[in-house]
Amino acid sequence: MLQIHILRQNPDFVIERLKVKNFDASELITNILALDEKKRENQVKLDATLSEANKIAKTIGEIIKSGKQDQATQLKERSVTLKAEAKTMANDLELLNNEINSLLLQIPNIPGDQVPQGKTAEDNEIVFSFGKIPTLSPSALPHWDLIKKYDIIDFELGNKVTGAGFPFYRGKGAKLQRALINFFLDEGLKAGYTEVQPPLLVNEASAYGTGQLPDKDGQMYNVGLDKFYLIPTAEVPLTNIYRDTILKESDLPIKNIAYSNCFRREAGSWGADVRGLNRLHQFDKVEIVQIATPETSYQVLEEMREYVSTLLVKLELPFRIVKLCGGDISFTSAMTYDFEVYSAAQKRWLEVSSVSNFESFQANRMKLRFKNKNGKTELAHTLNGSALALPRIVAALLENNQNETGIKISDSLIPYTGFKMID
């Protein structure tokens, strides 16, 4: 959520920058500022009323002692009236504040200066490419056929037990999943991240804190009776560790990594783009989260980008990094890099990671602050990234490494799988 003082100081700047996200904020900001002005006027009146009530409370005892009973009675009556007025004013202020916050929640994060103009993914900017795209034999299969051939992932059984998008992994398929999770976690520990095992359900406050609510309410599974939400990513519990917290600048950056199941309703049509492992309702992912100072957060973003790159290099997957344009960047992000691996049998690029800087947008919602070297309290910056999401990584590994005898396992994974081939 944007800080309201930014809207007060330079509303035209915010309106202009949000046009990069193809979002017209002019009416919203006009309404917010009008309500904010009314709120501040009412606050002045409330403060004056409370001040008068306090003065009466301090003098009324002395007046009673001096025998001025009539004057004391008048002051008591005035005190009762002031308290009633103050209560009404306080209630009105709370309503105004709720209305302002409701409107603020509708405004997306301001995109950073480096975010390119554009409306769709076609306008994203490719900033880095690595690896040679493999040439497969004419008999090569897409991963949804390979998994049947080698009996490593079962979608039909998942559909029977749960529903579409909840596959079973078995045999070497299950071992490959576990190998990737452990590989990603171990690499994160080497890079200085602290491993965390978070809960898979969060409360409404946590979902609001990282921006899933109200923007993505329809994409989340919820447990209505308890008002819990199944996490769409470990970003939500990892970042909310620091909700309502004041950190020390010397504590930053904080670097956490977590493996979790992720749950997304992913409502939409079915087709080749979402076939097999390309889109699931439950999947495995290793997430990295950092809490940084405003001065260092973009340096941290580049470090996270480089770190995710090293994982894909070690997996020997051809990949590219794209800087998302304004129309493709998320509601909460100030800047995002997407990582895409090439899936040789599908002959297309698959997104496997997003690394984002949210600046103070999430921190403002969560009241995540730190005390700087001068003792002043300010909002921290939050960043996260997939390192990595497994389904499309698995799809690319299976397709790109297939040959006549089976599917070759990347050298970096063999110590984790205990086998060199799926055959």
Image (spheres, rainbow, N blue to C red):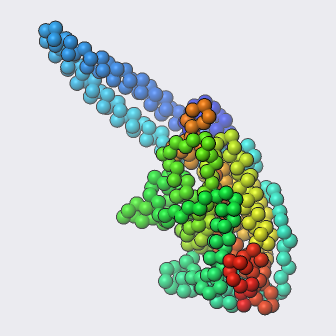
Please name whichever residue, 387 or 283, is drawn nearer the observer in this view of the structure: 387
Disc tally is 0
Q: x%, y% of residue 231?
A: 52, 63
Q: Quadrant of residue 38?
A: top left
Q: Residue at (75%, 81%) from the top-left corner? A: 409
Is residue 170 toward the left or the right of residue 52 in the image? right
Q: Quadrant of the N terminus?
A: top right
Q: x%, y% of residue 346?
A: 75, 77
Q: Is residue 419 above or below residue 30?
A: below
Q: Residue at (65%, 85%) from the top-left corner? A: 172
Q: Quadrant of the C terminus?
A: bottom right
Is residue 365 toward the left or the right of residue 410 in the image? left
Residue 113 appears in view? yes
Q: Is residue 66 above or below residue 228?
A: above
Q: x%, y% of residue 149?
A: 69, 90
Q: Is residue 53 above or below residue 191?
A: above
Q: x%, y% of residue 331?
A: 61, 52
Residue 272 appears in view? no
Q: Is residue 230 above or below residue 114?
A: below
Q: Quadrant of residue 195?
A: bottom right
Please name whichever residue, 366 or 40, is drawn nearer the observer in this view of the structure: 366
Q: Quadrant of residue 319?
A: bottom right
Q: Residue at (83%, 63%) from the top-left corner? A: 129
Q: Residue at (35%, 30%) from the top-left corner? A: 89
Is residue 395 toward the left or the right of residue 37 in the image? right
